[in-house]
Amino acid sequence: MLRYISTKQIEIFEFEHPFQIELDRDNRWVKLSKLLLWDELVRIYGRSLSKTKGKQSIDGRVAVGSLIIKHKLGISGREVICYKCFFFFLFK
């Protein structure tokens, strides 16, 4: 089952996070996130999940974003998890 919050959510720069540092608007991940059609990507991803069976998934945007990070950086899924531990703000 797919869990997803639409991209019509609050702007990333409006989000308050524990370190109170501002994300750089020129950051490559911030720029990329603005170019992607998240709703469409999550819809495609969601087709592979059951609508009635199984545990609810992580947020679709986190799943799709993790795949993008994995392929852009050329790293394994395990390494993506390590990145998530250290750079959790990339996955919000």
Image (cartoon, helix red, strand yellow):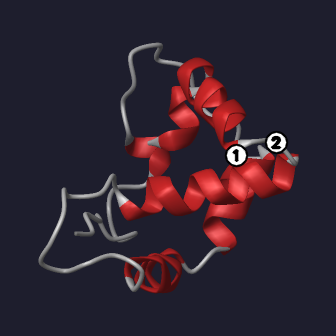
Camera-side residue of 12 and 83:
83
Residue furthest to the right: 74
Q: Residue at x 38, y 78 (%)?
A: 46
| Mark 1 lies on residue | 25
In the displayed structure, 11 sits above or below 22; it is below
Q: Position of residue 89 (x, y in %)?
A: 52, 32
Nearer mark to the viewer, of 2 and 1: 2
Query: Are there few (<14), some (14-19), or many (20+) residues within 10 Å of tag 1?
Result: few
The reply, left or right, for residue 22 in relation to residue 56 is right
Q: Residue at x 28, y 64 (%)?
A: 5
Q: Residue at x 54, y 21 (%)?
A: 85
| Mark 2 lies on residue | 75
Secondary element type, mark 2: loop
The reply, left or right, for residue 62 in relation to residue 49 is right
The reply, left or right, for residue 27 in relation to residue 7 is right
Q: Position of residue 35 (x, y in %)?
A: 68, 73
Q: Amino acid at mark 2?
A: Ile
Camera-side residue of 58 and 49:
49
Q: Amino acid at mark 1?
A: Arg
Please identify the quadrant where the N terminus is shown: bottom left
Q: Residue at x 33, y 52 (%)?
A: 58
Q: Position of residue 24 (x, y in %)?
A: 70, 37
Please identify the quadrant where the C terminus is shown: top left
Q: Position of residue 48 (x, y in %)?
A: 42, 80
